[in-house]
Image: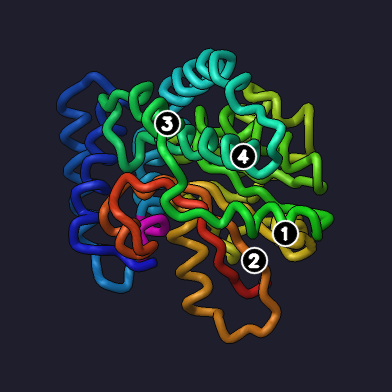
């Protein structure tokens, strides 16, 4: 997925938010923001990919600020919120109907996808958005296909998105493990509010399944930067579950470039369409809940 003109607003706001998170010194904030705007203007164009551009900007901000994890405090808050909230809702997810149970846990996972300080400002009412998502429906719903695929597969590769959200991934991962082996992947080092091994341990996912890292801090999936273990685990899986917009942006762009490769692997994208450019690319309305099945070429 390529960048749209309105993506500039989101990327610029991220720079402002991270500058304010890093320092209370207004002169330093202005310096970071001015630098960020300059970099955006240099890299902004129709051939840019949002997640790739975001990666380069946030890498430079980490280096410039000498802060390897600018969102650490916000990630801790998100994890604490999600853990507290999970205790209240997890019992509501169960059902004797296996499809309904799977759908409920997918919706919770999407609800977790709103705990995102990339497209959303840090001032957004996350709790209300989570409740609204759980009460809503899957606007794009490939859950029947997913259930059938689970029953005929041995291994699933699950690439995570954000801190906080990763807590809400846990019930879905447990449900998947009733059918298949699950390998979970997170970032190799911090960037934005993306989940790392530290967040995996907070969520308790490492206690229920195998966890690896991508070997990089790249937002979304960058195969040219990914570890050999990441690529081998993905290629040896029957299908992939990719959480969030960054993974959607990067994997769909990869397929547009490498779609001529004959050997394919199914990908189920689980996300909330949190901005108009992604919604338009998926073919839904902004705010819709998405479980979409596509395919990508193996690496």
Q: Which element type, helix, strand or loop, lies under badge 1?
A: helix
**Circle 4 is placed at which residue position?**
100
Q: Residue at x 53, y 33 (%)?
A: 108
- Cα–Cα span, label 2 and label 4: 22 Å
Crowding near pointer 2: few (<14 within 10 Å), some, many (20+)?
A: some
What x and y, as percent, mark residue 107?
Answer: 51, 38
**Circle 2 is placed at which residue position?**
266
Q: Which element type, helix, strand or loop, lies under badge 3?
A: helix
Q: Which mark is residue 135?
A: 3
**Prevailing secondary structure class for the magenta stretch in the rendered image:** helix
What x and y, as percent, mark residue 25?
Answer: 21, 21
Between 86 and 219, the residue placed more toward the observer is 86
Crowding near pointer 3: few (<14 within 10 Å), some, many (20+)?
A: few
- Cα–Cα span, label 4 and label 1: 16 Å
Res 151 → quadrant: bottom right
**Circle 1 is placed at which residue position?**
149
Q: Find the magenta span and give its range.
A: 49-53
Q: As drawn, which residue projects farthest toward the front?
A: 97
Q: Image height check: is 218 above or below 43?
A: above
- Cα–Cα span, label 1 and label 3: 26 Å
């Amino acid at each position: 997925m390529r960048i749209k003109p309105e993506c500039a607003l989101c990327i610029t706001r991220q720079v402002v938010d991270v500058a304010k998170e890093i320092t209370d010194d207004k002169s330093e904030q202005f310096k970071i923001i001015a630098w960020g705007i300059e970099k955006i203007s240099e890299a902004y164009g129709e051939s840019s990919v949002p997640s790739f551009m975001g990666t380069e900007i946030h890498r430079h901000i980490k280096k410039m600020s000498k802060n390897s994890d600018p969102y650490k405090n916000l990630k801790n808050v998100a994890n604490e919120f999600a853990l507290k909230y999970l205790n209240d809702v997890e019992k509501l997810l169960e059902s004797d109907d296996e499809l309904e149970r799977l759908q409920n846990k997918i919706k919770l996972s999407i609800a977790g996808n709103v705990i995102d300080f990339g497209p959303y400002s840090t001032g957004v009412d996350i709790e209300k958005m989570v409740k609204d998502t759980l009460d809503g429906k899957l606007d794009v719903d490939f859950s029947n296909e997913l259930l059938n695929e689970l029953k005929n597969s041995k291994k699933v590769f699950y690439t995570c998105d954000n801190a906080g959200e990763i807590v809400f991934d846990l019930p879905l991962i447990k449900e998947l493990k009733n059918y298949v082996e699950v390998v979970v992947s997170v970032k190799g080092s911090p960037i934005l509010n993306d989940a790392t091994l530290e967040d995996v341990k907070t969520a308790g996912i490492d206690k229920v399944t195998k966890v690896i890292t991508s070997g990089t801090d790249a937002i979304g999936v960058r195969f040219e930067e990914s570890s050999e273990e990441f690529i081998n685990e993905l290629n040896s899986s029957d299908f992939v579950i990719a959480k969030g917009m960054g993974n959607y942006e990067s994997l769909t762009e990869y397929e547009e470039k490498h779609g001529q490769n004959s050997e394919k692997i199914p990908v189920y994208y689980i996300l909330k369409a949190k901005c108009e450019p992604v919604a338009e690319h998926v073919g839904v309305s902004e705010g819709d809940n998405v479980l979409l099945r596509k395919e990508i070429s193996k690496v």
